[in-house]
Amino acid sequence: MAQRSRSKTATTARPSRGELREVAAKRKRNSNLLLIGSGIALVVIIGLIIYANVRASQPVGGEQSLPTLGNTHIEQGSTSPIQYNSVPPTSGPHYPGLAPWAVYREPIRYEQLLHNLEDGGVVIYYQCEDNCPELVDQLDAFARPLIAAGRHLVVVRNDPTWTGDAGSTTPLHQEMDARIALVAWQRIDKFDEFDEARIRAFFERYEGIDHHSGSTG
């Protein structure tokens, strides 16, 4: 009698077909919801990546994006074998060595500073007939804390009359038609009045991006 009672209880506790179908349907719904949620998350991630890439390619101010002229290394002290496509240049043949990250009161060869750009640096050129001491002081105050923190930044004078060696008559710089030029690899922004927000935005966008990939030098 006890055995029959246990069998009846076990039979009664067994879920019905309807209950099994409901459990299976619930599991399927949960699985579908999980798949949909995962799909939405993936779409959001892909969208954020695309947005970040598009945003990184957009200018932060009035800068120009220029085609690359390559990154071939040339002999130290020589002149670029090609004409650069901007003044100051943003890419092209350059020397193997770097100029130290610093603020300079005197000009430096474009061919030298291009390697700084290739290494992820930003160069701020300034040009004015009176050497613009007030502007230089403003640029100096902006740049020195960043340089002291190990950031890749050079401030340097552009002088279209500078010939380098005393015996040379060929200028090593060209007229840049502005008092200030912000330069990164393939990027340039020119304007006349000191604008710290504009300078900082350019610097933060482009500093630290290495451009040695595919180097031919």
Image (tube, grey):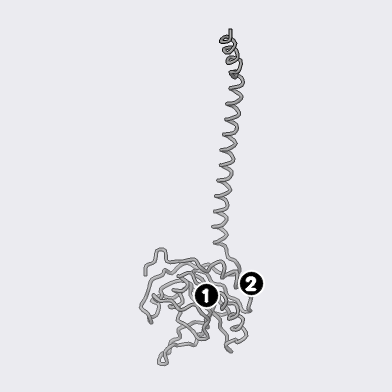
The reply, left or right, for residue 118 in relation to residue 199 is left
Question: Is 30 in front, or is 157?
Answer: 30
| Residue type marked 1 | Leu
Disc 2 element: helix
| Contact flag, marks 1 and 2 (Cβ < 8 Å) | no
Q: Residue at x 39, y 75 (%)?
A: 96
> Of discs 1 and 2, which sits in the foreground?
1
Residue 114 appears in which quarter of the rendering? bottom left
Q: Quadrant of the N terminus?
A: top right
Classed neighbour count for the residue bearing mark 2: other residues with Cα under 10 Å, few (<14), some (14–19), many (≥20): few
- Rendering coords of residue 117 (x, y %): 47, 72
Q: Is residue 139 above or below residue 35?
A: below
Q: Earlier in the sequence, mark 1 or mark 2?
A: 1
Q: Which residue is mark 1?
A: 153
Residue 39 in the image, given as x and y percentages of width and height: 56, 42
Nearer to me, 1 or 104 = 1
Q: Which residue is mark 2?
A: 197
Total marks drawn?
2
Q: What is the three-letter code of the residue carrying label 2?
A: Ala
* Secondary element type, mark 1: strand
Nearer to the camera, 4 or 188: 4
The location of residue 112, given as percent across then percent down, is 43, 78
Identify the residue at horizontal 39%, vertical 66% (top origin): 215
